[in-house]
Amino acid sequence: MARVAAASRIRMSNPTGVVSFSFDDVPQSGCRKGRGILESLDVAGTYYISGGFTQKLVDGGEPFHDWDDLRSLMGGEHELGSHGYGHLNYQQISIDEVRADLEKNRQFFSELGLERPLQSFAYPYGCLNTRVKRACAELFASCRGVLGGINTRTVDRSLVKAVPLYSWKLTERKVASLIERAERDAGWLVFYSHSVIPHPNAFGCTPQLLEFAVRTAVRSNCRVLPVGQALEYVQQAHPV
Ligand SMILES: [Zn+2]
């Protein structure tokens, strides 16, 4: 129900396709290796950070981002987004607890020195309901989910469709075909991943797959933009 209810739909007017690369939580390999790959191809990404994960270990041992990773990301072209502070399942807690968790992450970034409130948000675990969706849409320009494929013709800014860039799930051929579809339909394709390591768990990708995806997107006619800029691009008037 929530996937269609409380929609905040925008008609897309972008003349060319758009591809965004994003990372959730974010493990250190996403902030370092992933970022390095993006920058080597002159692309900026969106990093949806849960402040509660800073300096912690991912299950299985990989470290999450640390303070220096965040400061360094803030100083560059990349976009920082919110993923809530405690990485909570928003379907299982009250709306007041949801708001408190979002506020805690806002404060976390404010203490880190970020002056502007974050504009982009991704639902932890992709979990939401109608009330959560409304509350998040009030606070952020865009709220990204974890499902749905390519945003085409319209985009629900309170539930932006996305595609997991996970190595077990996507071959290079599938990645290329998604980018081709975004190009052909002037769609907005938002990839997300977590770790970027040679042997990722179910929620990550190899450096090779990420590099392939970014390179393919850059070589296509699509614009490659962080989520916040992509949202502006798809809704602005484009004179022909
Ligand atoms: Zn997450």
Image (cartoon, grey):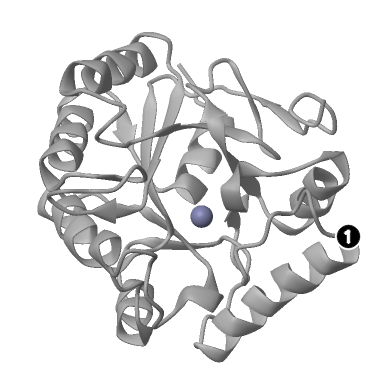
Q: Quadrant of residue 62?
A: bottom left
The residue lying at 38 percent from left, 22 percent from top is: 17
Residue at left 46%, top 27%? Answer: 188
Residue 128 or residue 136, whichever sits in front: 128
Is 9 above or below relative to 30?
A: above
Q: Is residue 115 above or below residue 144?
A: below
Mark 1 belongs to which amino acid?
A: Ser
Residue at image coords 71%, 40%:
158
Q: Which residue is mark 1?
A: 94
Which residue does the image show at 37% across and 86% down from the upper left? Answer: 67
Of 63 and 70, which appears nearest the observer?
63
Quadrant into which the C terminus falls: top left
Judged from this view, the residue extending furthest toward the front is 60
> Which x, y percent locates residue 81?
52, 61
Residue 20 in the figure: left or right of residue 218: right
Image coords of residue 45 (percent x, y):
34, 52
SS under mark 1:
loop
In percent of width and height, residue 220 lies at 21, 23
Viewer-side residue, 7 vs 130: 130
